[in-house]
Amino acid sequence: MSGQRTLIRNIGLLLSGKLEQPILDADTVLSVDGKITQIGKAADIDESGVDTIIDANGVTLAPGLIDSHVHPVIGDYTPRQQQLHWIDSTLNGGVTTMISAGEVHLPGRPKDIIGLKALAIASQRWYENFRPSGVKVHAGAPVIEHEMVEEDFKELANAGVKLLGEVGLGGVKDGPTARKMVEWARKYGIQSTIHTGGPSIPGSGLIDKDVVLEAGTDVVGHINGGHSALPDEQITCICESCRAGLEIVHNGNERAALLTLRTSKELGCLERVILGTDGPAGSGVQPLGILRMVAMLSSLGDLPAEQAICLGTGNTARVRDLDCGIIEVGRSADFVLMDQAQHAPGATILESIQLGNLPGVGMTVIDGVIRTQRSRNTPPATRLPLIVSRPSNA
């Protein structure tokens, strides 16, 4: 894709993904070789040598959504739900990047140290080498066990593993052991997440505020429960007592999600709130899970829609140290183009979302390459972007 230039023009509303400036005064974005190179007005953008031109037709362009919490297994298949192409379905919901919280749904998942390290390294490799429908799946997230030593974390990091599976899904469920292993992981550049709340599947267990705070992970996984949430006072205490990312998931308790949102706003730390689905899980696959979380938090949490979208894009990118999720020069050209759903109430797409309605996805772009057009899963958009030109081999 050397020199591949993609121009998106006639953008009606450009959402940046940044809480500090969620709306940009621009209508055109240019990317080269999958990276954003120019953002501005059409008259100021150099269109020479462009390979792909997309006429946004007045719709909204936002960063591709990020799902901070998924449990992939292999390829685009999940044995948990016996379902194929769940990642492609999620792409049709505007999600262009996924973060694994552990490949725990693999039948016969190894729990011995050699086996769990082998699984993590293999998972990292196969999603690095194969991107389902172009979606970026950051995987290879080992679930820690008591027998692990510091050298295991060094070995994992040297092999390319950058994530830990949810602390608490394996044998380690106590604060002191978790803290020691989280610090080993951090020493070697591995980011950590902890299960929060009641057991989700057989083998997991209750992880309460004391364990969460003592473990000191980088992300408080599904703070609203996956599925069962902690008591209100414990959720509030976690928000107040640490600086970790506060992950709200679709598969959790919605009331607890709103409590987390409200508390983070009161504390002035909305930038810590990130979104995931915690799927595939017992409640199924949620292709529209992130969009549904955006609409729910905006409509019931009194949060402007343009800020709610930041929770599922730029906030997650910053907490997870990703180069996508924000419309900014130098970042990945991962976009979702969407419009107000047909006949949905609201004068604008933002007003419609804040009334609790899902937008219609008209196109997704990953690394400057068109991946999907009209979504088969969202309600139909009022307007659709148009492909003006694209390379003959695309």
Image (cartoon, rainbow, N blue to C red):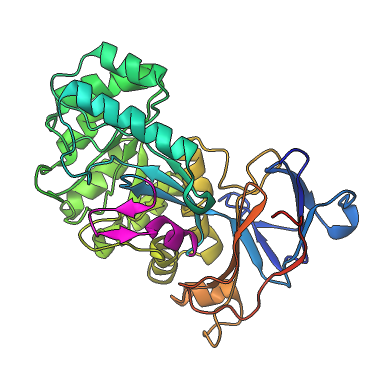
Picture quarter with the N terminus: top right
Residue at the image position 40 percent from the left and 17 percent from the top = 158
Residue 93 falls within the magenta-colored stretch: no
- Confirm whether residue 218 shows in the render: no
Q: Is residue 77 above or below residue 388?
A: above
Q: Position of residue 189 (x, y in %)?
A: 41, 22
**Does residue 224 sit above or below 194 in this rendering?**
below
Q: Residue at x 28, y 49 (%)?
A: 222
Q: Is residue 314 left or right of residue 169?
A: right
Determine the image quadrant of residue 336.
bottom right
The image shows residue 193 at horizontal and vertical percentages of 30, 36
Magenta range is 75-92
Q: Quadrant of residue 351?
A: bottom right
Determine the residue positioned at 26% across, 42% down: 238
Relative to 116, 23 lies left or right: right
**Depth order, front residue of 299/10:** 10
Q: Given the current orientation, which residue lies at the most extreme front position?
A: 393
What residue appears at the point 83 percent right and 51 percent down from the top-left corner? 50
Assess whether residue 83 is covered by the magenta stretch. Answer: yes
Nearer to us in this view, 135 or 261: 135
Numbered label tally: 0
Residue 308 x/y as whole percent? 48, 60
Closest to the observer: 145 or 304?
A: 145
Which residue is the extreme one toward the top?
151
Left or right side of 84 for 171? left
